[in-house]
């Protein structure tokens, strides 16, 4: 399920972004608990904490990393999880392709699929 536009807009406003969000996906700390949004732009990856009560309220910037930072690989099996910034995060399986695409855009551009909806 794509991240809804209102959430994307809140992230953009929260971060004061005037650039496009390339990728965005929700994650939880491994084992449940604190929620996060990973917001990927052309220049950086910003991880925003939403706290343990839900994804509705953006609380603080947990970390900001250069765009050249790899997010994955995502380990699958008993669930999808990845290590980033020294912490483990879990994501719904549907967001694994988002993480893979964000990484491929920087580290494996030759294998990116053609955008099926380039005007969106």
Image (tube, grey):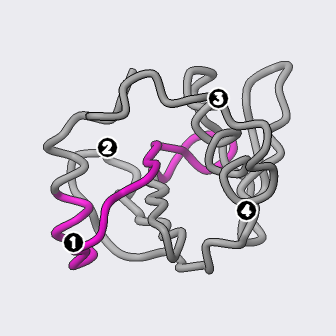
Percent from the top left, x then y, of residue 79? 74, 24
The residue mark sitting in front, 1 or 2, is: 1
Residue assigned mark 1: 14
Q: Is residue 2 above or below residue 54?
A: above
User: Which residue appears at 54% of the width and 78% of the height?
Assistant: 63
Gap between marks 3 and 4, in whole Å?
25 Å
Label 4 vs 2, first from the N-terminus = 2
The residue mark sitting in front, 1 or 3, is: 3
Occupied quadrant, residue 66: bottom right
Gap between marks 1 and 4, in whole Å?
21 Å
Q: Nearer the viewer, residue 37 or 34?
A: 37
Occupied quadrant, residue 73: top right
User: Which residue appears at 41% of the width and 65% of the height?
Assistant: 48
Gap between marks 1 and 3, in whole Å?
31 Å
Q: Nearer the viewer, residue 115 or 4?
A: 115
Tag 1 near tag 3, CB within 8 Å: no
Percent from the top left, x then y, of residue 20? 31, 61
Residue 104's label in the rendered image is none
Q: Residues within 10 Å of mark 3 (few under 14, many from 20)?
A: few
Tag 4 near tag 2, CB within 8 Å: no
Residue assigned mark 2: 54
Label 2 vs 3, first from the N-terminus = 2
Residue assigned mark 4: 84
């Amino acid at each position: 399920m794509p991240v809804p536009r209102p959430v994307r807009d809140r992230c953009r406003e929260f971060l004061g972004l005037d650039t496009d969000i390339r990728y965005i996906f929700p994650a939880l700390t491994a084992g449940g608990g604190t929620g996060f949004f990973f917001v990927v732009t052309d220049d950086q990856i910003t991880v925003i904490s939403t706290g343990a009560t839900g994804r509705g309220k953006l609380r603080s910037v947990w970390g900001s990393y250069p765009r050249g930072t790899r997010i994955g690989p995502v380990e699958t099996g008993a669930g999808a999880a990845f290590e980033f910034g020294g912490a483990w995060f879990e994501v719904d399986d549907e967001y694994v392709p988002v993480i893979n695409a964000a990484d491929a855009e920087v580290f494996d551009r030759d294998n990116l699929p053609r955008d099926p909806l380039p005007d969106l």
